Amino acid sequence: MSGARVLLVDDDAALLQALPEALHLRLPELVVDTCDEALEALRRIAEVDYDAIISDIKMPGMDGLALLERVHAIRPSTPTLLITGHGEHELAIQALRGGAYDFVKKPIDRDYFMASLARAVQMRQLSRQVEQQRLDLERHAASLEQKVAERTHELVAANRAKDKLLRQRDQALDEARVAAERLQVLQHVTDTALTHLDLHNLLSELLARVQGALRADVVAILLLNGASTALRVRASIGLEQAVGEEIALGMDVIGQIAERRRPYIVDDLTEVPELIPGLRAQARSLVAAPLVVESRVIGVICCGARATGAYTHDDAQLLRLAADRIALALDHARLYQEVQEAMREQRVGHLRVEELATQLGHQAAELGAIIEAMADGVFVCDPSAHITRLNKAASTLLGLPVGAAAGLTVADIGEMVQLRAGDGEPLAQADIPLLCGLRGETRTDLLTVITQVRTGMEVRLRISSAPIRDQLGNIVGAVAVSRDVTELDRLERQKDEFLSVASHELKTPLTSLKGLAQITRRRLERGGHTEAAHLAGMERAIVRMELLVNDLLDISRIESGKLALRMEREDLPALCRQVVEEQTAATNRSVHIDLPADAILVDLDADRISQVLTNVLSNAFKYSPTDQSVTLRLQQTADEVRVAITDRGPGIPKAEMPYLFERFYRVPGIDVQAGSGVGLGLGLYISHEIMERHGGRIWVENNPDGGATFTIALPMTARLRSVSIPLKVVNSTQG
């Protein structure tokens, strides 16, 4: 590209400055002239034979298409590249049909533009070379004619040399004619390349041109496959059945032509292996040349004739020149097809986006209808904590007209309805559920109290909240769902009051009945009556009733915050041993104990921890076979003491474990192995509450070999936990 000179025509001053600088960086030897209007450009084009002209299609005065027409009139061989804006596809097609070498869409893809310009300049310089060769041949022909004239003049003087001079003249004229014909062939190939954009039609036209120029019986174009590992027969005249066949690179003559990048002549195809299936049946000699674009091999073109030795070195050179133009044309057509495919994909993408937008609209409408139909109040806020949506139920809970809260901040609404915690204390702003959601926290069943704006009524709500995240996980808002539990809380309090009163009313007559039964049993035993055994069973039934009543009393104390703990320094192994002895004596069941010999002193309420151990041991006896022992093991760690009680029962279904420590819950489908199956499902709930108030833990795990293990853990030092209801703690001293 040494010494190349191009003209840039555009009314955009910024482009006139930026584009030459970019061209100089990529093509430092290229000289770029600029012009901002078409008439001045025509004047320069008339004075200078540029290698390429770059022009914008839309310019004031004379546009790029008109300029293209005038350029073809002045410089028909100068390639012209037109720059188009977005959406000017039809203008671009019109420009190509009008003779433009290429078009470039704004914003300009620099790599594509540089490659296209380089090809245009290369084609122009090649055209000049061809023109120069034609002129040289014409001068040569003129020189020959001059020689013929001189020789003819000499023949006038010497008739003996006449015939020889005439033969020399005829031979020179034949050479000039052949050279002119070859130039015409190259021109036809170039014209075909510039006037066809469809690859299929282009291949058919090119094959026909080459076949006529080289008088070939068979013509084929082979292009690299997608993996660039083999040549595939893309189009052919005379070997249509071979289209689609592949030849590995480096294999045989044709594969070597692609690798060596130079023409090749085979005088007799019977002396070489079969190159293309069916070729030897149609031809005896072959000439082939590589298709090269910017030092990149894209394929091979080959011609075959039925006669042996049909092709000369001149034929090979002619095919090579034609192959260079064919390669450029194929690459140009490929780029055009890629642009067309990209535009088709873009249209399909637009349609898909519209379909998705419609689907999202339907889904949004469905979601909106569901939210509005919900009985629970739904609140949605954006990242700035402004309410963006709330349904009718939410407005009703707040005591506001529908839509009145939209646009307010979460803090404003909290202040408006006097948002408080479940115990009536003011709720810190950081603990407001929607604000917790904006911090990425999820809250469930938070009990709160509000005062309705319109009625002034106090309403108790259970609120669950969560963050709203986008596809990248970023928080884009928060949502909260509120349920009015005022009536449920009222019924719950009535139930607790009833249980408290009923248990207190039952405890006194049960105590009297138990005393009378004991006195009567002792009298009957002293009198030797057998009915004493019946009274013993009656006492056991009364004891079970007392346990149920005590459980109900404990529930009442827990709910009202009156469950008193008498914390003392106790020897936990000794306490475990005492509870085991009491239970084995009462049930005649065996317990395997694993206790340390030394005392382990822990701050605890001995009666309440004994109650926990008794509850767990009773369950172990109840659900274990009578011939199986229960194991109690005590272990000490750095900061806590653990007591594990293992039974040999059926174990606990994994799905039921989350509910095991809830009030009135009994695992369904498990048969009692020993003892009474009567119970309210309160023992484990009370045990859990007692351990919580000791700052300890209780949990259950299934054993791999069957059965379950309940573990209670107590801190080595007192660590009483705060609860939502005030807890009464009594510290007593030993003595």
Image: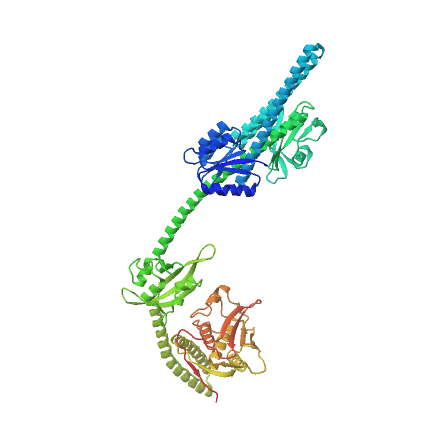
Compared with 665, 290 (above or below) is above
Residue 652, image x, y percentages: 51, 67
Instruction: Give the residue displayed 38% in from the left and 49% down from the top.
Output: 361
Q: Quadrant of residue 499?
A: bottom left
Q: Quadrant of residue 224?
A: top right
Q: Is residue 269 above or below residue 544?
A: above
Quick one: 633 or 175, which is closer to the camera? 175
Q: Is residue 455 visible?
A: yes
Q: Total label count?
A: 0
Q: Position of residue 427 (x, y in %)?
A: 37, 69
- Is residue 204 among the parts visible in the rendering? no
Q: Residue at x 49, y 63 (%)?
A: 655
Q: Residue at x 49, y 68 (%)?
A: 671
User: Vertical placement of 379 versus 491: above or below?
Assistant: above
**Depth check, front residue: 318 or 234:** 318
Is residue 337 shown left or right of residue 519? right
In percent of the image, x 36 and y 53: which residue is there? 368
Report the side of 62 relative to 651 (left or right): left
